[in-house]
Amino acid sequence: MSRSRLAALYALAVILGIVTAWLWLTKVGPSGVDAGVWRVNLLAGSTSADAYTRARIALGALLALDRRETLYYIARSDERGESLRADCRYRLSGPAPAARWWSVTAYDEDFFLFENAARRYSVNGDTAPRDPQGQIVFEVGPESVTAKPPDLPTQGAGALLLTLRLYNPALSLQRDPGSLAAPRIDVVGSCP
Amino acid sequence: MSRPEHARPRPLLGHLIGLLIVAAAAHALTVWALPRVIMAEVLRVTRVEGSANADGVLRPPPADHTARRIVMPSPDLLYATCSLDVRDRPAQITANINYQRYWSIALYADNSDNFMVRNDREHGARALRWLIVGKDARYPIPAPRDVEIIEAPGTKVLLLMRMLLPEDSADRAGAEAARDSLRCR
């Protein structure tokens, strides 16, 4: 085998290594504990995070805090197991999480906030609508699906990512984040 | 005439093993380097933009859809950041935070690990006085009684202050005043 061909093969091996790392970090779901359709990574922000967790957090949630301070639950699918989409309307419902303060934020597939004229980017413990039983109930999605405006507007037709942040979560949740009675995510109407 | 041993072409199996090792090394290096490269850029930008202020603190506006620097920004928090280099001297952090809602100050190493965080309930109402020193620092470290000394795992540190941003405008002004008290020197 000629030297130039060999050098090309080794360059290809380097590219293969970089590409597999990138695909593994961006396409394979992060490890963690599930609470309903939400997943929380227990090592986010931790000094004991493994190299893959650290790299995933750097790409998708840089400067996270550890679980004692904040728990970050992420949902990428609804109760049917279908991927969340920015062009579908969803209803989130359930008990308020046991934390000093909490919020749900909608992110576009690029991990940034959706543009919306009302500048509503999150629903939180102060602003969440509640039903007569005290359960939180609010809707996420595009403006045009139903007459009722969404509490959390989205745009476009790409993937939707929901993050539930619990600041100073209850001790029971710090110990067992999977025990969270997490908000259900049900699709409203038909999803195109 | 036979070829000398060292001039013989490498067998195919040897090349395959070599290629696998190179691919695995590139994979591992990418995973290892990614958070460090991203943090280096965040530290650099924070240092450049923070240096425009005499107190060394960068105070961005609340995150909205135009915020494209840090992924998954929280729209519910007011942030302040400092880029600290503690290789040749310690960094002095001071703040007088009189704010009744949630706040925290977190310190991140250059590999993105959150090696320290303190919130309002843990800290209380007293003035915040920290001295951050590099790992195995060889410079003299002053130790006044009211100053807490924190050892960083390296020499580059990102400080990130978070303050819960309330809907009420009076509380908002309180949050901004508390944030403005932060100094990084």
Image (cartoon, helix red, strand yellow):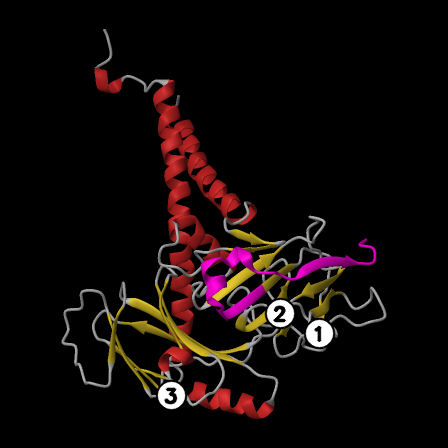
> Label 2: few (<14), some or many (≥20) within 10 Å?
many
Q: Secondary structure at mark 1?
A: loop
**Amino acid under label 3?**
Ala
**Residue sticking out furthest to the top:** B1
Picture disc at residue B125: 3
Of the pair A77 and A16, the residue shown nearer to us: A77
Q: Residues within 10 Å of mark 1 (few under 14, many from 20)?
A: some
Q: Is residue A126 visible?
A: yes
Where residue B97 appears, as percent x and y from the top left, is 41, 87
Q: Callout 1, which amino acid?
A: Arg
Q: Which residue is mark 1?
A: A130
**Label 2 to label 3: alpha-carbon separation:** 29 Å
Q: Are marks 2 and 1 in contact (CB under 8 Å)?
A: yes
Which region shows up in magenta?
A164-192
Q: Is residue B52 left or right of residue B8?
A: right
Q: Is residue A75 found inside the magenta-colored segment of the image?
A: no
* Residue B4 image position (x, y, % from top left): 21, 15
Q: Which chain contains the residue that carries disc 1? A: A
Q: Nearer the viewer, residue A103 or B15?
A: A103
Spatial CA distance of label 2 from label 1 is: 9 Å
Q: Secondary structure at mark 3?
A: loop
Above or below A3: residue A189: below
CA separation, marks 1 and 3? 33 Å
Q: Residue furthest bottom?
A: B170
- Identify whether B177 is placed above or below A157: below
Tell me the kind of residue under disc 2.
Ala
**Residue A88 is drawn in which quadrant?**
bottom right
Give the residue pinned by disc 2: A96
Residue at point 58% right, 64% down?
A: A164
Q: Are marks 1 and 3 in contact (CB under 8 Å)?
A: no
